[in-house]
Image (tube, grey):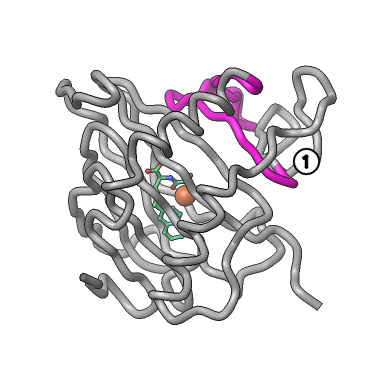
């Protein structure tokens, strides 16, 4: 099943459901190599989401700004490699949404505990704005908020549940979005947590 949320934004409810245990195991393997961290924003605020990355580029934030790097800020080592299992899922979802190129240069892993939120933002640190972003939600369901191309657009909300895959491309690629504070709840595979994976293309294709 494919539901269009907006032009270029497609949700595939449960697309990752049967693969969720293996996806979680692969995510744990990444976290053992590159542990979750609470990054600091350029404004000096500690993010409530704990993050880590994998693939050729990882996303980081500190007092000097947001950016993608080839190496980890904590030890200068490369990010963990992108697991083939993730690669296949991203290729499948991208194709199903009708986009030509899957975003496989960077994977961002976000950890939400009860009360964790992600305030309204645009994803614009990538040079490539043509390739869609693919997201995979695992564990406790969250309320996703999304507006339009400017911060003042009215917000809409919907549930992102365990196993849901969303492809955000075309005109939806630059929309403002966020996650409401995670409710106290539990899931058999993740306890009180929610894990979100996002896949991105960072550099422009020539
Ligand atoms: C719509 N993550 O990592 S995933 C992020 O659930 C981020 O952790 C949220 O926003 C999370 O930047 C939301 C859904 C998502 C991801 C990227 C988007 C929606 C998007 C980029 C453009 C438009
Ligand atoms: Fe985002």
**In front: 28, or 127?**
28
Q: Residue 111: x and y, percent?
A: 42, 28
Magenta stretch, main secondary structure class? loop
**Picture layout, residue 194 above or below residue 66:** above
**In front: 39, or 159?**
159
> Which residue is at 43% across, 23% downward?
48
> Which residue is at 26% across, 38% downward?
180
- Horizontal relation, residue 153 to residue 187: left or right: right
Q: Mark 1 highlights which residue?
A: 69
Residue 163 part of the magenta-drawn span: no
- Horizontal relation, residue 40 to residue 14: left or right: right
- Horizontal relation, residue 174 to residue 145: left or right: right
Q: Quadrant of the C terminus?
A: bottom right
Q: Residue 106: x and y, percent?
A: 64, 49
- Which residues are drawn in magenta? 33-57
- Horizontal relation, residue 54 to residue 154: left or right: right
> Which residue is at 52% across, 68% downward?
132
Residue furthest to the right in view is: 76
Q: Residue 3: x and y, percent?
A: 22, 72
Q: Quadrant of the N terminus?
A: bottom left
Residue furthest to the left in view is: 185
Task: Report the number of numbered marks.
Answer: 1
**Image quadrant of residue 150?**
bottom left
Q: Residue 38: x and y, percent?
A: 54, 20
Crowd band around label 1 with a 10 angstrom C-alpha radius: few (<14), some (14–19), many (20+) = some
């Amino acid at each position: 099943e494919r539901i269009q949320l907006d032009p270029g934004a497609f949700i595939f409810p449960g697309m990752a459901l049967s693969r969720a245990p293996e996806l979680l195991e692969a995510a744990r393997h990444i976290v053992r190599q590159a542990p979750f961290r609470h990054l600091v924003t350029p404004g000096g605020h500690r993010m409530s989401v704990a993050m880590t990355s994998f693939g050729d580029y990882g996303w980081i934030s500190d007092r000097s700004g947001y950016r993608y790097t080839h190496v980890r800020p904590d030890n200068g080592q490369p990010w963990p490699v992108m697991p083939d299992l993730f690669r296949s899922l991203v290729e499948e979802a991208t194709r199903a949404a009708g986009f030509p190129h899957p975003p496989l240069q960077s994977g961002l892993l976000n950890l939400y505990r009860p009360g964790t939120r992600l305030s309204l933002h645009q994803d614009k640190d990538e040079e490539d704005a043509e390739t869609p972003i693919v997201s995979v939600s695992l564990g406790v369901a969250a309320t996703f908020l999304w507006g339009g191309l400017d911060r003042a657009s009215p917000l809409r909300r919907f549930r992102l549940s365990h196993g849901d895959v969303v492809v955000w491309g075309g005109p939806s690629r630059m929309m403002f979005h966020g996650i409401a504070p995670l409710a106290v709840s539990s899931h058999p595979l993740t306890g009180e947590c929610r894990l979100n994976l996002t896949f991105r293309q960072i550099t422009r294709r020539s």
